[in-house]
Image (tube, helix red, strand yellow):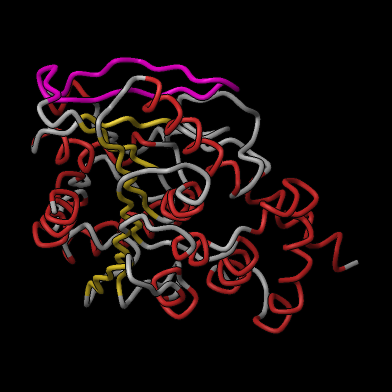
Amino acid sequence: MLLTLAFLSDHFVFGKRCDKNPLLKYYTSEDLGLSAEAVSLPNGLNGFIYNKNGANAKESIIIFCHGMGPGHIAYTTEIEYFCNVGYTVLAIDSRGCGFSQGKNMKGMYSGVKTVISAIDFAKENHFKNIYLVGHSWGAYSALCASAKRKVDKVVAISAPNTPSRTMRDGAVNMGVLPRPVAAILQPFWAFVNFVKFGAKGNANAAKCACKNSTPTLLIHGDKDGVVQLKNSAFSKADGKYIEKFLAEGKGHNPYNTVKAETYLAQLSQYLKKKQDVSDFDFSVATEEDVVVMQKIFNFLES
């Protein structure tokens, strides 16, 4: 019975597509003045290469790894930031998300496979330096992928540590399951991931970050209610090549200002209550924290 519950709950999260919410505003390359070239990778993965006015001054590429949601389209203002400072950005949507094919997302390790495919593409196109920047699910994917493919640097923002712990915390935070029941189910969720992906389906992001010599910057908000700090890769990883930045007063989107995070929380409540969001100021909700973004830039440039 517990195993059945684990399979059903996993299917509830990953057994569907994740596309754009028609009620929300998603900034496009045209809105932000970016050049965008469509890219198709094996297994139905699609995305874009972004840059500013066709420039590739740094001969380096940032692979942006998106979190749970409709793909990289939810992060175009962050992509714009990196393009504005001279980088080319490759953003590929994972299976079942946004521009990519697939009837469902399948599971967390699908994101790792997406990042590996993106790294292979960047290597085939002879970019001098390859950097991974990811948020949430994308941060987990970036850390795990860095143990499979050599890259130059990794920035992981709000990274969960393991899929089963992520399911456990998520079930409790959303009020779906009582904490004791979620704790009992954790090993069953690990078994579900093993069935779907083999041993790699339970990859530990912190261990992946520590097993190689890739310089890695971990960023986490001390108020993160989605990926709790104590259960994050930020708390579990340590080593010579690991650098950490704790964003005080921040939640799950520490690259945004506190005001932006507050607006996003309000937006979530509006959507839950099915309130009208046509007058919502999405420019405020996507306002980046210049300190955090500068921290990332300085790390990549060092």
Q: Front-most of 111 and 199?
A: 199
Q: Residue furthest right?
A: 1
- Residue at (21%, 51%) from the top-left corner? 285
Predominant secondary structure, magenta span: strand
* Percent coordinates x, y for residue 227 in the rendering: 45, 68
Q: Quadrant of residue 57?
A: top left
Q: Quadrant of residue 191?
A: bottom right
* Percent coordinates x, y for residue 238 in the rendering: 39, 74
Figure quadrant of the C terminus: bottom left
Quick check: 192 left or right of 76?
Answer: right
Is 100 a magenta residue? no
Q: Front-most of 302 and 63?
A: 302
- Residue at (29%, 65%) from the top-left corner? 219
- Residue at (91%, 66%) from the top-left corner? 1
Quick check: 117 left or right of 229?
Answer: right
Above or below, 7 against 276 in this view is: below
Is 44 a magenta residue? yes
- Residue at (42%, 36%) from the top-left corner? 71
Magenta stretch, residue numbers: 34-56
* Percent coordinates x, y for residue 53 in the rendering: 9, 18
